Image (tube, rainbow, N blue to C red):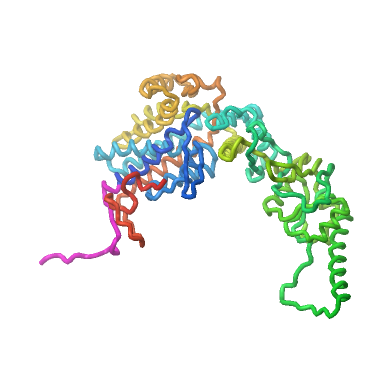
């Protein structure tokens, strides 16, 4: 008797099993690593990304590159996710994470080709990553979280691999001041909420004109032409209520039979608005910043009282204004008193490019500040914004977790040397996985060297001899294209970033290695499955760019 054929999967569903599935997934993930590999480090190249609408992004930020390209392959999507997670968690090291994950998968593929079971490789990688983190913590240097000079070195190191590297000195000062302004002590540690640093950007100016405002910048203009455009020693009222006549919540009808009645109705509305404005005047406020609307008549009365008003402010900006000026957000204008007011040295409307913005500056002890990023063109200012974000996060990492490492691939070279020694103490096949993990870690300094035009083989030999000498400060001096002691060159990175890079890359590699069966449902469109057995998985790892 012949065995009847059982149809388990829906028609059009494709299945890839065993080695084919593993090779397919590893190849796609390695392609993502290759894509950002040339962007690593101060000598890394930029990518130009053009979307379907023709908008251009030029960047060497790993997270931005992977966010902008439309990746279809599921394994490749996992690599994109780890770069996003790293960007959210520590802000820097996104390219390193993807490069390391790709390198680990490449090494794992060599072992799988020699019939080492994927679960053995995964176990070996996990043990090696734990050992690597322990080694990193051992060579980490504890520092004072409020040491301005040191934090500046961290910011300059992060900015050195960006488009803004030539202006890194001025930008680093701005970034460190911004983070220290919003840092709050909780117990014996410091907490930093980077949301309290408002980042605004405008082109048509030099990067050198980027400035820190000890207060908030609002991309709004003063509501009425008769209002003052500049007020010193400002008393600021923050309103979460409209300066308008409120409409009823249900349908209401008013019958007006004569022009006199119409006039009485209008006069009564004006009186109500006048009362609201009188409340604001009585509180002593000379600035009104309102989240809702301000009626035309209310604008007139405010202007008459010499009060500067701004309306339709975002709720997030209102919260930042409260932190910056010390004002309390008031929802009922009748309850407004002088105790609810905040203060600032100066509130002024200024021309920024073709727009008018309101600057609230000189707040006494602001717990929210603004950075106004400038650049010669829109493309440049976008990259300046991304660079400042990464540097803000790196400085925040050190303030919250005050342990640093010498950068430039030095920690990876040192940890790889230690892992090779430790791997010899393991028994069986996990030893092979641990050795391959060490080789994978070495990829970071070697890619830095490649991007600086150095010979990878010579660099590897030199690095290994220096790393075994006992110092964890020898890395790639990309400026002079040689292996050197980077401690004297102030190349400093947060330990938090390195830990995140190792953890995220290991987890992604292990997750991809454990997959031995890929079942893909058919798409409703008329696209035929690719030869690799999965829709959109042929060619370049299923990436639409």
- Compared with 188, 74 (above or below) is below
Q: Nearer the viewer, residue 442 or 70?
A: 70
Q: Nearer the viewer, residue 196 or 454?
A: 454
Name which residue lies at 76% across and 52% down. 310
Camera-side residue of 426 and 237: 237
> Compared with residue 188, is residue 148 higher up or lower down, i.e. above or below?
above
Work out whether residue 425 or residue 253 is closer to the camera in this orientation and state it: 253
Q: Is residue 17 above or below residue 372?
A: below
Q: Quadrant of residue 378?
A: top right
Q: Is residue 3 magenta?
A: yes
From what the image shows, is residue 191 above or below residue 412? below
How many labels, in total? Answer: 0
Residue 134: % across, % down: 47, 34
Q: Is residue 404 visible?
A: no
Quadrant location, the C terminus? top left
Q: Which residues are magenta?
A: 1-21
Q: Is residue 403 left or right of residue 82?
A: right
């Amino acid at each position: 008797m012949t065995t009847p054929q059982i149809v388990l999967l829906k028609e059009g569903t494709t299945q890839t099993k065993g080695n084919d599935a593993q090779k397919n997934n590893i190849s796609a993930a390695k392609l993502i690593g290759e894509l950002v590999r040339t962007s690593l480090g101060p000598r890394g190249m930029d990518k130009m990304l053009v979307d379907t609408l023709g908008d251009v992004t030029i960047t060497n930020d790993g997270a931005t590159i992977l966010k902008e390209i439309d990746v279809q392959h599921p394994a490749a999507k996992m690599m994109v996710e780890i770069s996003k997670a790293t960007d959210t968690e520590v802000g820097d090291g996104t390219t390193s994470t993807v490069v390391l994950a790709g390198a680990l998968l490449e090494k794992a593929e060599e072992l799988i080709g020699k019939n080492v079971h994927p679960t053995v490789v995964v176990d070996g990688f996990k043990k090696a990553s734990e050992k690597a983190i322990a080694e990193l913590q051992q060579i980490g240097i504890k520092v004072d979280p409020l040491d301005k000079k040191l934090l500046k070195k961290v910011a300059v190191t992060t900015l050195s691999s960006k488009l803004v590297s030539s202006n890194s000195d001025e930008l680093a000062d701005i970034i460190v001041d911004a983070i220290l302004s919003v840092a709050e002590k909780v117990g014996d540690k410091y907490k930093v909420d980077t949301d309290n640093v408002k980042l605004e950007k405008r082109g048509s100016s030099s990067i050198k004109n980027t400035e820190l405002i000890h207060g908030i910048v609002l991309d709004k203009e003063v509501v009425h032409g008769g209002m003052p455009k500049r007020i010193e020693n400002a008393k600021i009222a923050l309103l979460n209520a409209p300066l308008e006549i409120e409409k009823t919540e249900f349908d209401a009808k008013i019958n007006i039979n004569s022009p006199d009645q119409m006039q009485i109705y209008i006069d009564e509305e004006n009186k109500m608005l006048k009362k609201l404005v009188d409340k604001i005047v009585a509180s002593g406020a000379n600035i009104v910043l309102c989240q809702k609307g301000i009626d035309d008549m209310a604008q007139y009365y405010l202007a008459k009282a010499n009060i500067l008003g701004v309306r339709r402010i975002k709720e997030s900006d209102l919260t930042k204004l409260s932190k910056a000026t010390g004002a309390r957000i008031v929802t009922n204008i009748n309850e407004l008193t002088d105790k609810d007011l905040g203060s600032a040295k100066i509130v002024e409307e200024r021309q920024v490019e073709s727009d008018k913005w309101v600057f609230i500056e000189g707040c006494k002890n602001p717990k929210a500040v603004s950075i106004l990023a400038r650049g010669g063109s829109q493309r440049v200012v976008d990259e300046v914004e991304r660079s400042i974000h990464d540097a803000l996060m790196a400085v925040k990492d050190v303030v919250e977790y005050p342990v640093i490492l010498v950068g430039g691939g030095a920690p990876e070279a040192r940890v790889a040397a230690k892992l090779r020694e430790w791997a010899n103490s393991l028994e069986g096949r996990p030893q092979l996985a641990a050795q391959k993990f060490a080789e994978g870690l070495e990829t970071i300094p070697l890619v830095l060297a490649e991007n600086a035009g150095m010979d990878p083989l010579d660099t590897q030999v030199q690095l290994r001899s220096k790393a075994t000498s006992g110092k964890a400060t020898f890395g790639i001096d990309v400026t002079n294209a040689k292996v050197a002691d980077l401690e004297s060159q102030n190349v400093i990175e947060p330990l938090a970033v390195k830990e995140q890079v190792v953890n995220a890359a290991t987890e992604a590699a292990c997750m991809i290695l454990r997959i031995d069966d890929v079942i893909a449902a058919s798409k409703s469109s008329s696209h035929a499955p690719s030869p690799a057995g999965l829709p959109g998985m042929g060619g370049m790892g299923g990436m639409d760019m």
